[in-house]
Image: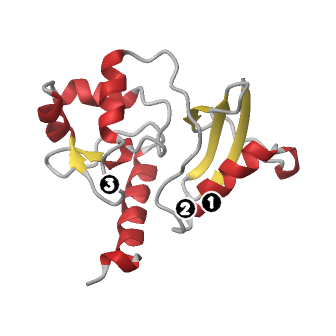
Amino acid sequence: MKINHISTPIGVLCLFFDEEFNLIKITKPKKLRTINEKAHSEFIRNIKILFDDYFEGKTIIIDYPIKMHSISEFDRKVLNFIKKIPFGQTVSYKWIAKNLKTSPRAVGQALKRNPLPIIIPCHRIIKSSGEIGGYSLGIEAKKWLIEHEKTILYKLPSHKT
């Protein structure tokens, strides 16, 4: 396994890769580490560019090879479903639960185990009351991502009438 850290507007992210440089996990590091840009391989430089473009509003998707290891069939079903939620939109845990014929709590637990937040956009899922809900990268990061996507969506030429 290969590990690298990148700096983003929501803080430092720890990226985990398998031996073929497929992205397998994204977390916030427990300890801040110095980021050595020169140590990045070509693969890691490429994903860093994709994240930079996403955070700068130049792209709405981070298209990079991923692998999801050791997740249940139910979690995979939930994560595959939320990948279809459009950029800049939010839906409720309850709405997803209704579509997947399960409970909002089960959806929340599956999202809690999402190994690839941002890539699999669980930040787009909120409570039906409009409250933000939980997020593995932190509530402030979730708020920032939701606002960022809405702002970028508004600026896109295809969005203007």
Query: At 35% from the left edge and 76% from the top edge, which residue is drawn?
Result: 158
In the rendered view, tell whether residue 24 sits above or below residue 63.
above
Quickly name the residue at label 3.
Answer: 86
Can you give x and y, in whole percent of width and height, for residue 63 in the image? Answer: 54, 48
> Mark 3 or 2, which is nearer the eye?
3
In terms of image quadrants, where is residue 108?
top left
Q: Residue furthest right?
A: 38
Quickly name the residue at label 1.
Answer: 52
Can you give x and y, in whole percent of width and height, for residue 70 in the image? Answer: 49, 15
**Mark 1 residue element:** helix
Amino acid type assigned to the residue bearing label 1 in the image: Asp
Quickly name the residue at label 2.
Answer: 55
| Contact check, label 1 and label 3, Cβ < 8 Å | no
**Mark 3 residue element:** loop
Can you give x and y, in whole percent of width and height, for residue 148 in the image? Answer: 43, 64
Q: Residues within 10 Å of mark 1 (few under 14, many from 20)?
A: some
Amino acid type assigned to the residue bearing label 3 in the image: Pro
Query: At 74% from the left edge and 43% from the top edge, which residue is drawn?
Result: 43
Spatial CA span between label 2 and label 1? 5 Å
Query: At 30% from the left edge and 30% from the top edge, which residue is drawn?
Result: 78
In the rendered view, tell whether residue 85 sits above or below residue 16.
below
Considering only order in the chain, which callout, 3 or 1, is on the residue closer to the N terminus?
Answer: 1
| Contact check, label 2 and label 1, Cβ < 8 Å | yes
Quadrant position of the N terminus in the picture: top right
Give the total number of marks visible in the rendering: 3
Q: Residues within 10 Å of mark 3 (few under 14, many from 20)?
A: few
Amino acid type assigned to the residue bearing label 2 in the image: Phe
Quadrant position of the C terminus in the picture: bottom left
Q: Residue furthest bottom?
A: 161
How are the residues colored? Answer: secondary structure
